[in-house]
Amino acid sequence: MLRHSSEREPLTARFPEFSSLGSAHVMIAAFQIAVARLFEPNHGLKDVDLLVSAMRRAFGPELPWPETEALIRFEMGEDVAIGDFSVRTKTFAMILTLGAYTDFVERNEAEVDGLLTEAERRAFDHGHHPELAE
């Protein structure tokens, strides 16, 4: 959906910013879970490169692709520098990765809802208090 401006713009207008720090932690947890589901242990750089290349074709120049690749690799346990990335860039890269994950699971509502529920649980387990999805 994020690829199509007719769908992206109304969604963006509804969610201009996180309503709480807890909500940001749900997004981070969802990103971590999605990366773990997309890349089984022992996947290499080639697999990350293939995903990011597909994301570049889908999202175009809006995708901060070097940062997205670095964040995914960092989440997979590689020693890559991400400290200089802005919060905005990290957030955008994570959101677009979650969009790619949604496409990967063919927009299966149960799969996406399960990921969000697990992300909320993980955020709570780490002491954050996001607003729960209805």
Image (cartoon, rainbow, N blue to C red):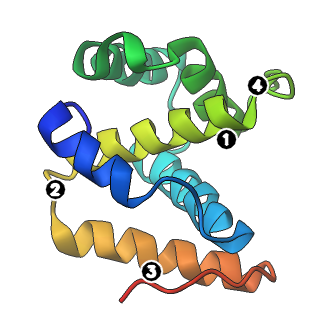
Q: Is residue 30 above or below residue 72?
A: below
Given residues 55 and 49, the one toward you in this image is 55
| The disc label shown at residue 85, or none | 4
Coordinates of residue 105 in the picture (x, y in percent): 21, 52
| The disc label shown at residue 41, or none | none
Of the numbered discs 2 and 4, the one sitting upstream in the chain is: 4
Mark 3 to mark 1: distance in Å?
20 Å
| The disc label shown at residue 107, or none | 2
Tell me the amino acid under the disc marked 3. Answer: Thr
Residue under numbered circle 3: 117
Residue under numbered circle 1: 75
Horizontally, is 9 left or right of 124 in the view?
left
Of the numbered discs 3 and 1, the one sitting upstream in the chain is: 1
Tell me the amino acid under the disc marked 4. Answer: Phe
Given residues 107 and 33, the one toward you in this image is 107
Question: Residue visible at 44% across and 80% down?
Answer: 117
Coordinates of residue 48 in the picture (x, y in percent): 47, 23
Tell me the amino acid under the disc marked 1. Answer: Glu
Disc 1 to disc 4: CB gap under 8 Å = no
Tell me the amino acid under the disc marked 2. Answer: Arg
